[in-house]
Structure formats: C-alpha cells, structure tokens
Amino acid sequence: MPASIFLVLLGNTWQKEGPEKMTLRTLLCLASVAVLFLLTVSVLVASDPQTISYVQIVAKENVTLLNSGKWMVEFYAPWCGHCKRLIPIYEQLAKAAASEEHKGKNVNVAKFDCVANNEVCRMYSVHSYPSLYFFNEGTMHEFVDERNLAGLTKFALQDGWRVSPGK
C-alpha cells in the first residue's frame, strides 16, 4: 500500500510510530478499513442495475414478438407492490426457462410495462397488475394459479397453460 494511503488512513499514528513500528491497533484499523471497503464494493455490485436478468423486455415497438413462439409475459406497473414482490420469483422462472433442463421448451419469459405502454395493455384487456399470460403462437392463456415458483413453472414450463382456455 502506498505511503500516502497510509497517511490518510492512519493520521497521527503514522507520525508517532512510523512504518516500521506498526502496532496491533494500527493493524486492526487497517483491517477494519479493508473490510468496510469490501462491503461497500459488494453492496455497489449487488445493487448494480446492469445485473444480468433473464427476463426480456417487451414494449409496443416489439409486441409483435408475442405472435410467434412461446412467451410467458407479466403485464405490470412499476409502482405496483404485488408486481415488486413477484420480481425475484419471476426472475427465477426466467432463469429456469433458460437452463439446460428446459431449453428444449423454447419458452421466452418477458415483462411488459403497462404504464409506459397503456394502449397495448388495453388491447390485451389487462386491467390489473400483475397480469400473467402465456402466449403460444399469439394465443393468450391466462395464469390464475398461485404466484409462486412452483405454480409458474408448472404453467409455463410444464405445459400447464394447455388446460387454460385461450383467448
């Protein structure tokens, strides 16, 4: 560690003891600063908005994607408390859909912001949040089970949507 950093960290201790006489107190001070630094860095990394997400974003510009393939879509509002509580569960579903175990299903997991794209949500008759639908080649199947990982997995990745009437 450069001497200038020692000076900043240790202040008067440096002047009294010098670099050759580091006391236990000085070592503890350095260890504490190092731990605080690592905690700060880990918090910054964990709260980084660029953290990888498996959930795709659908907007009015690319909503036609839902007409082909298989899509599990959450219609949400950013201010909605139920939507916020669903985020980690929905992210787990998306991660599972991308896993080797379910890759052959070719299910895309996406979300659609109804506040930013209100007219599209009205077109799909979405009036409450979150609303969850499975799109199979453009046909909508509403998810009405419990909003937990088991229920969502059964519906989206284990063909549970087949028993839901399509719109």
Image: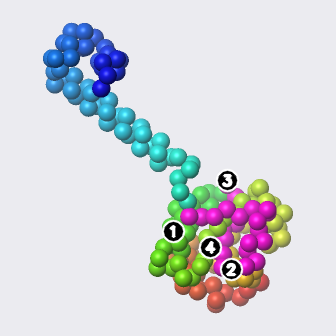
Give the Cα distance between marks 2 and 3: 30 Å
Query: Most extreme residue toward the bottom, as rendered?
Result: 163
Question: On the image, numbered disc 1 is attached to which residue?
Answer: 95
- Residue 25 visible to the viewer: yes
Please name the amino acid that badge 2 sits on.
Gly
Please name the amino acid that badge 3 sits on.
Trp
Q: On the rendered structure, is 56 left or right of 41?
A: right
Q: Which SS class for mark 4?
A: strand
CA neighbours of label 2 inside 10 A, class few (<14), some (14 to 19), many (20+): few
Question: On the image, numbered disc 4 is attached to which residue?
Answer: 108
Query: In the image, which residues are magenta?
Result: 54-78
Instruction: Examine the rendered structure and indicate whether residue 163 appears above or below residue 1.
Output: below
Question: On the image, numbered disc 2 is attached to which residue?
Answer: 69
For the point 67% across and 53% down, the residue is 79
| Picture quarter with the N terminus | top left
Instruction: Give the foreground label among 2 and 3.
Output: 2
